[in-house]
Amino acid sequence: EVQLLESGGGLVQPGGSLRLSCAVSGFTFSSYTMSWVRQAPGKGLEWVSSISANGASTDYADSVKGRFTFSRDNSKNTLYLQMSNLRVDDTAVYYCARTALPVGHFDSWGQGTLVTVSS
Amino acid sequence: DIQMTQSPSTLSASVGDRVTITCRASQSVSSWLAWYQQKPGKAPKILIYKASNLESGVPSRFSGSGSGTEFTLTISSLQPDDFATYYCQEYKIYPLTFGGGTKVEIK
């Protein structure tokens, strides 16, 4: 069974930093592109970042570029999202998601972790 | 960036109704379009990929059509479990973008 489990969310002050993790199981992690998608309270879905299967390539939404860093450890089946210089509008539930092979939709999602940026 | 526009934003319907949701892309995405269902407090769930392919395990009352810039999600006979919010998403090119969502409510 495919499982994705996010952790690391919480309350942080504006300008602060936080690192999210996503532990995965049930599939060959090193074969898949993975992504983060977020959802602000009461709002729609927003793609944040994607990382290639080997971790060599990343893409970011303009809203987080230069502040967030997406990485992965294929030996630990874990994703990391390092978030810095956080802003109030980064407040959201952050989901990790698997990109289906060979096409590119998100076929599996974690349950999400809430990040609240507030003073 | 490609903009995805869904309509309507809210839809009131009854059990048994045929429901259609539209998604328009600001430029062609070919068939690189997915539809997701999301219920309150839950992660999104894939329904349709590559515009018209039904994800395994998804009931056949869901169908998708379209290509290029115009797409539709149809629920042939709305069931109580289908009251939720639906999102389209293009995955032709980064940045990946979602539509604003369509909330299907009980009439």
Image (spheres, coloured by chain):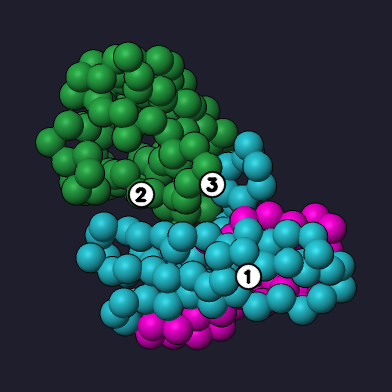
Q: Residues within 10 Å of mark 2 (few under 14, many from 20)?
A: many
Which residue type does callout 2 highlight?
Trp
Nearer to us of marks 2 and 3 is 2
- At a point 40% along the width and 15% down the height, the residue shown is A11
- Is there one chain holding both mark 3 and mark 1? no
Is there CB contact under 8 Å for labels 2 and 3?
no
Which quarter shows the N terminus of chain A?
A: top right
Label 3: which secondary element:
strand
Q: Chain of mark 1?
A: B
Q: Is residue B91 left or right of residue A93?
A: left
Chain B as rendered: colour: cyan
Mark 2 and mark 3 lie on one chain; the one further toward the N terminus is 2
Q: How many marks?
A: 3
Q: Is residue A30 part of the magenta span, yes or no?
A: no
Which residue type does callout 1 highlight?
Leu
Identify the residue under disc 3.
A108
Chain A as rendered: colour: green
Between the C-alphas of marks 2 and 3, the distance is 14 Å
Q: Residues within 10 Å of mark 1 (few under 14, many from 20)?
A: many
